[in-house]
Amino acid sequence: MRTTTRKSYSLGCAGLAEGTNANTFKTSNILHFNIGGRAYVKAATDNIAFAAETALTAAFVAQAALKVCIYHFFIDSAGAITVVQGTQYPATTEQSYQARAIDIPFVDGKACIGALKIQTNNAATFTPASTDLGATDVVDTFYNFADDLGTPVTI
């Protein structure tokens, strides 16, 4: 029994992680995914550049200092991965911080394979494809999704 109502979804763990080269990410595992009833496979791939998912993110905006933001990763039938930048909220260290759950956005014809939570501490800022994930005070946490997309990422 399928646990998601989406037409496109990941069938396993992409193994999302920081890429070997600066400003990149990787999929550490072979990834099986479904798009509109068709099954696809993507080999493990290193040094994937951050590319904005233009259906929801016109261009990346610098994440300000002392903020937390969720970035969702989507894959298409050709294996190209794009990223949706979410809303910036006060970091967990800030007095105005409020715990919340971030739902997974929908992109037609693409499967969501995971997410990245970035928190910028002290004076650090973060811009995908520009700031390295290993930069000082840029705290990153990767999440891998399977077919049950009913569980949001919490911050």
Image (tube, rainbow, N blue to C red):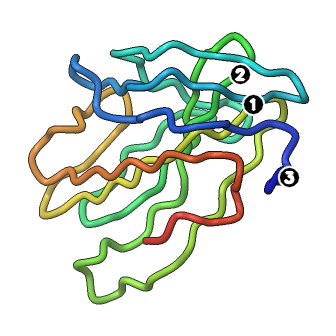
Whether the residues at callouts 1 and 2 have beta carbons within 8 Å, the answer is yes
Give coordinates of residue 45: x percent, y percent: 42, 14
| Viewer-nearest residue: 79 or 59 | 79
Residue at image mark 3: 1
Q: Place residue 68 in its image quadrant.
A: bottom left
**Element assignment for label 2:** loop
Q: Residues within 10 Å of mark 3 (few under 14, many from 20)?
A: few
Q: Could you tell me which residue is drawn at 67 percent across and 30 percent down?
A: 54
Q: How crowded is mark 2: few (under 14 residues within 10 Å), some or many (20 or more)?
A: some
Give coordinates of residue 43: x percent, y percent: 51, 13
| Viewer-nearest residue: 72 or 43 | 43
Q: Residues within 10 Å of mark 1 (few under 14, many from 20)?
A: many
Residue at image mark 2: 76
Q: Which of marks 1 and 2 is nearer the N terminus?
A: 2
Q: Which amino acid does label 3 sit on?
A: Met
Whether the residues at callouts 2 and 3 have beta carbons within 8 Å, the answer is no
Q: Earlier in the sequence, mark 3 or mark 1?
A: 3
| Viewer-nearest residue: 71 or 8 | 8
Q: What residue type is labelled 2?
A: Asp
Q: Which amino acid does label 1 sit on?
A: Lys
> What's the CA distance linking mark 2 and mark 3?
23 Å
Q: Which mark is residue 92?
A: none
Q: Could you tell me which residue is drawn at 25 percent across and 34 percent down?
A: 131
Residue at image mark 1: 110
